[in-house]
Image (cartoon, helix red, strand yellow):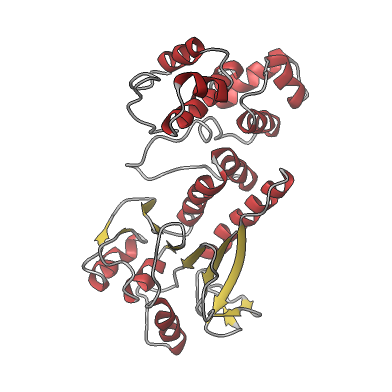
Amino acid sequence: MIDVLFLLLPGSLILDWAGPAEALRIANGLMHKQGRAAPFALRFCAPRAESVSSVGVQLSGLEALPASLAAHPSWVVLVGQAGPRIGIDSPDTGALLDWLRPLQLAPGRLELVTICAGAVLAAHAGLLAGRRATTHHHHLDELHSVAPACDVVRNRVFVEDSPVYSSAGVTTGIDLILHRIDAICGPALAAQVAQTMVVALRRGPHDPELSPFLAYRSHVHPALHRVQDAVSQSPQSDWSVPGMAALAHTSPRHLTRLFLEYAQIAPLQYLRRIRLAVAQTALASGDSVTQAAAAAGFSSDTQLRRAWQHFAVPGTPSRPVSLAGV
């Protein structure tokens, strides 16, 4: 279980925290449907129990800033506030910064997530020195001024510098949280969360190509998503086009038309691409070619090698070059 602490100040941008919180809630629900434990515990903390959001919505029942963090992993989420600069003179902001300064960030144990100008608050708390981070374009110079030892990255959707994860603005906070859900729950579930929210999955302009689990999903056709979800969750199964069509409640011919129209790939080609991604992950974990082929659902090493060549993956299964795009 990961404690996710959204730290809220008066005037916090509501979409900075509400969008990512909904993504995490949906991920919990999807994991529960699969018979797996919900991975995220959402907590909303503030220097005082009542506050007001950026749009005037009154918030009450907020948890006090905890005296200590749980022994299990935690994410601290800092969000932006309205205005051209982030003020730090208010008692609430002072209390939050005092709480942040002693934090000892560590990958997998205590991680920092900043959304929009939340990075500026992190900078004021001294948490970004020596780190790479981004923020909303209106606050890039401010971030550099507050934390000159931070490598401020411009023109990025989000930046990953574990244990610090920063995003550029309101909607990119959802992009970043989907990326973190991918890391914790797997790409297939992250794709389901994005599809449920009807948002496009994207990464920064210099990040690797989208995972095959996330590619081919920029549509809103529910029957096709249903098939893609099932294939992604169990690529090793004995799939056929008629079997996929049964899930979509359509004919095999019509399913093929749906795949080509909405996903721009044929059903069995999609299956091979997903299986190839599974095999690449297995190889990266130290499996032999034979073990990786079996884990992915290929009937032989030869099938895996043919798929590798067909999709022009660099290197060979025996000597892979990179897992970019997996």
Percent position (x, y) of residue 309? 41, 14
- Give the quadrant of the C terminus: top left
Q: Which residue is outermost to the left?
A: 148
**Which residue lies at the image location 54% right of the left edge and 35% below the top edge?**
218
Horizontally, is 219 left or right of 283 in the view?
Answer: right
Vertical arrangement, residue 123 with respect to residue 270, above or below: below
Percent position (x, y) of residue 144? 24, 67
Front in this rendered view, residue 93 or 149 = 149
Residue 322's image quarter? Answer: top left
Percent position (x, y) of residue 32? 71, 49
One can see residue 14 in this view: no
**Which residue lies at the image location 28% right of the left edge and 55% below the top edge?**
153
Q: How many marks?
A: 0
Vertical arrangement, residue 246 with respect to residue 42, above or below: above
One can see residue 13 in this view: yes
Front in this rendered view, residue 148 or 284 = 284
Residue 116's image quarter? Answer: bottom left
Residue 137's image quarter? Answer: bottom left
Percent position (x, y) of residue 273? 51, 23
Front in this rendered view, residue 275 or 12 = 275
- Give the quadrant of the N terminus: bottom right
Front in this rendered view, residue 203 or 155 = 203
Vertical arrangement, residue 108 with respect to residue 298, above or below: below
Horizontally, is 5 left or right of 305 in the view?
Answer: right
**Which residue lies at the image location 51% right of the left edge and 64% below the top edge?**
74
